[in-house]
Amino acid sequence: MCYTIDDAKRWEICDVGEVSSCPYSVTYLFAGDADDSAGNNHGVITGATLTSDRFGAANEAYAFDGDDVILADTPFRTGNDDFTLAVWLSPGLVNDASWHGFCGYQAAGTRSPSLWVNWNGGGGDEDPLDYGLHWNTKTTQNGDGTAYGGVIVSFFQLDTYVHVVWTANAGEKYRFYKNGEVTPDGTLPAAAHVDLHDSYQIGKVDNWFVGVIDEVSFYNLAMNSADVAAVYAATSQGMQTALETRACEGDSIEITCGEGTINIVDATYGRVHGADVCPHSAVSNQECHAPESVNIVSAACQGQTTCVVQALNGVFGDPCGGTYKYLTVNYVCAGGGSATQVYLFAGNADDATGYSHGVVSGGASLDVDRLGTASSAYMFDGVDGKIQVATPFRSSDGDFSISIWLKPTVIDDGSWHGFVGYQDPATRSPSLWVNFNGCDVGFCDCAGAPAGDCVPPADLTHQCSTAGCCDCSTANTGNSGDGVSGNGMHWDTRTTQAANGNLHGGQRFAGVADNYFTSGVYTYVIWTKGGQDCTFYKNGASTDNTVCPTDVDLHETYDIGHVDNFFTGVIDEVAFYNYELSSDDAVDMFSASSAGMTWPSECPGSASAQMFKFNLDPQGDNSGLRG
């Protein structure tokens, strides 16, 4: 049987063998392999080869040449009704008088909901049917054998990425989405039952796909339109066209990103063109490339806002003596204009798009995550281990949210342990520490305060009065305190950066949210700010609410595992948002991202998608994640 944890959130614990109603999903990001994003389901590859993805990142998608396939597990079980299929793909063949199945399953007497590129209508290049999305399902397994099928017109272009989503409310409606929006002809009657199968073919149905498939997700629920739009927005961030710059031998390249940070897509020092590029008499060798070009340019530029690289043999070595060379660099400015930046630490410190690359330094090393998956979190040694990452923040940003999974292994040792934040001599961005030591709660600053009093001065920091520190909880956060001084979460921000025109310019806001941490135990922390309202969440529940400045010194980079001192323990996942998450968001994000910590053995064969760890319809009314 299935035990409902929360009717409003539709999360359940299921006995072995009864998994059909567990609202789980499986996502294949193709990040170097065909495993699902939780690492539990392993796709079986026949012929398909790794290639660059929609962001230009190498070995992050699969190329299919017309006889390749990947067999992938799904969360579906016999008799499932509602479902969603989502695929990022770039077709290499359209309008060639054939179909090209890219996601589906069929066997004798049955066909699961399946999708094809290029239903051929015979009308030539101007016929929208020739560039359509063909869909089809037969319901013999649970129905009357009726075939449901059709074409969504004008869907594909040659060698152009598109995000395809098919949602189904059983017996009601099918909806087809292109790049986050329902197509004009994309709302159709649905079969009462469909033959969903526990494995699907990617790159094939009854015939074969040619092109690139970048990401595939299966959900055994019908996503609503708000969530489809949110998923498209999140997974299309960074799909800007790479910029190219070039310098002839002896000159220099200067790269500057006005917004975001530099992400190197490709680089080559050598010569692959004739005399039309960097003209010279010595151009006979046009197959010349310094093999370390990308690594050298990345070392100088990756994650920076500006950099200069010289096109010299002394920098790259001489790959072809006697040939006049040049340096070509392709790059994008990552993070600029993005609403979120998510670091899953799934084998590396890249963000979830694969586009922004965290810089790991000192004693930070891959470790087992909260779900027991190897090399999917980072251990920090408390000495010099940290990761510098890009954020979606810009100077003087107002609202924000920061979420993080962490497991401290040192608390109550007479010190602070910064785990996420940024500071320089002039400013401190909103930052967090394990173990404010000395006070139970509140901000301890005893200078000049009368004995026995808790004084809220003009800068709203709420000073503690005695050398032993008083309990400032009522004045500071409303948290009554538990009498234990070493288990709280210290928060702090200084607003010097936004002093001009800022109501609270130059002031400091700080305090302690009490009773947050236990050594060796994971905690999910969220700090949100909307206007002057700051709220702190522990494991999905609001614990503290206090006054914050109207503007804060948010920075375009943050340190993980460090602020002004270092963290000891494991950090599993960090996300930055340049808006305020709601209390419902906090609950839903914790529910989804903690599910595998206690429940995975209850629902074998299923896996919650790690890239979008939230309940897609928490209210059960198609209102979506954020309403």
Image (tube, rainbow, N blue to C red):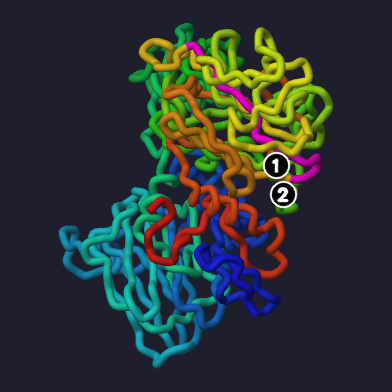
Tell me the distance, in whole angstroms, between the alpha carbons under discs 1 and 2.
8 Å
Rendered residue at 70%/39% (across/down)? 516
- Viewer-nearest residue: 574 or 548: 548
- Residue at image mark 1: 377
- Viewer-nearest residue: 586 or 425: 586
- Residue at image mark 2: 370
Rendered residue at 53%/12% (across/down)? 322
Name which residue type carries label 1. Ala
Rendered residue at 59%/49% (across/down)? 540
When the figure is inspected, residue 510 is found, relative to residue 346, above or below; the finding is: above
Based on the displayed image, in which of its 4 quarters is residue 278 positioned?
A: top left
When the figure is inspected, residue 256 is found, relative to residue 580, above or below; the finding is: above
- Viewer-nearest residue: 425 or 167: 425
Q: Nearer the viewer, mark 1 or mark 2?
A: 2
Check if mark 1's residue and mark 2's residue have beta carbons within 8 Å: yes
Based on the displayed image, in which of its 4 quarters is residue 357 positioned?
A: top right
Is residue 319 at least partly visible in the picture?
Answer: no
User: Where residue 391 sits: x, y (%)?
Assistant: 51, 30
Judging from the image, what secondary structure is the residue with disc 2 in? loop
User: Where residue 364 sits: x, y (%)?
Assistant: 74, 30
Name which residue type carries label 2. Arg
User: Is 440 situated left or right of 153 in this image?
Assistant: right
- Viewer-nearest residue: 401 or 607: 401
Q: Main secondary structure of the magenta part?
A: loop
